[in-house]
Amino acid sequence: MTASKPPPPRDLVWLLLTLTFVTGVVDAVSFLGLGRVFVANMTGNVVFLGFAAAGEASLSVVASVTAVLAFLLGALAGGRLISRIEDRGHRLLRHSTTVQTGLVAVSVVLAATLGAGGRLGSELLIVVLGLAMGLQNAAVRRIDIPDLTTTVLTRTLTGLAADSKAAGGQGARPVRQLAAVAAMLLGAFAGGLLQLHVTMWAALLLALLVLLGVLGILVARKETDQLP
């Protein structure tokens, strides 16, 4: 009989929920402002790529391919980072969030200067944001907290229904599952409001400020852990 996996630290759960909010913000920006493409949800991009190849004029093969390749490069960089860090929790998240925060900061500058009106600005933003979200996804995959992928909700929603008591399951994590859905929904709502009614760089600035908050908490925790 194998030992059950210990529950994850509560603060780590909250930090990943916060990153899920960031995903909602960033994907709102990319879909609404960068040509109907996702930089975090790769399932959507693969489907969009098929639609674009079939002739759907509102979608771009180039944008979808660019997003997928950037995400893969970000995940590759995340894998390299993971190989150098044995920790699967706060330390790994701190290092990945540091790099991710830098990339999102670059995206804010790009959005405020080049904007997304031209092809160059849009493609650069897709690349930078795709790198950031691929890195996040690689780190969170290694941390491996059930129902908290921070970028995809399909498995979370499946677990919410299939593992529920109504389905004959134990219904072990409904609060966490619902919180993940709510976090991405709120992020998409906030990002959508700013993208549609203010400006793109304001939406990306929101994502940056939230990431800085996450990073600040992780750095403070490191300093606390090092106290004698």
Image (tube, rainbow, N blue to C red):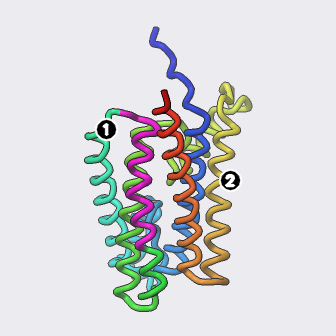
Majority secondary structure of the magenta segment? helix
Label 2, label 1: how far apart the Cα atoms are: 31 Å
Vertical relation: 38 (above or below) 113: above
Looking at the image, residue 73 sits to the left or right of residue 175; the answer is left
Q: Position of residue 136 (x, y in %)?
A: 42, 53
Vertical relation: 190 (above or below) 169: below
Q: Position of residue 77 (x, y in %)?
A: 28, 54
Name the outermost residue toward the right: 166
Which residue type does callout 2 highlight? Ala
On the question of residue 152 being in view, the answer is no
Q: Position of residue 26 (x, y in %)?
A: 52, 67
Looking at the image, residue 81 sits to the left or right of residue 159; the answer is left
Q: Which mark is residue 182?
A: 2
Which residue type does callout 1 highlight? Ile
Mark 2 vs mark 1: give the one in front: 1
Residue 97 covered by magenta stretch: yes
Q: Nearer the viewer, residue 78 or 94?
A: 94
Q: Nearer the viewer, residue 196 or 209?
A: 209
What range is drawn magenta here? 87-106
Q: Residue sitting at 44 percent across and 47 percent down?
A: 94
Residue 99, by quadrant, is bottom left
Q: Which mark is residue 27?
A: none
Q: Mark 2 or mark 1: which comes first in sequence?
A: 1
Task: Please tell me how crowded label 2 is: few (under 14), some (14-19), or many (20+) other residues with Cα within 10 Å.
Answer: some
Residue 37 covered by magenta stretch: no
Name the outermost residue toward the top: 1
Name the outermost residue toward the front: 228
Disc 1 marks which residue?
85
Kind of element beneath mark 2: helix
Vertical relation: 55 (above or below) 138: below
Q: Residue sitting at 40 percent across and 72 percent down?
A: 106
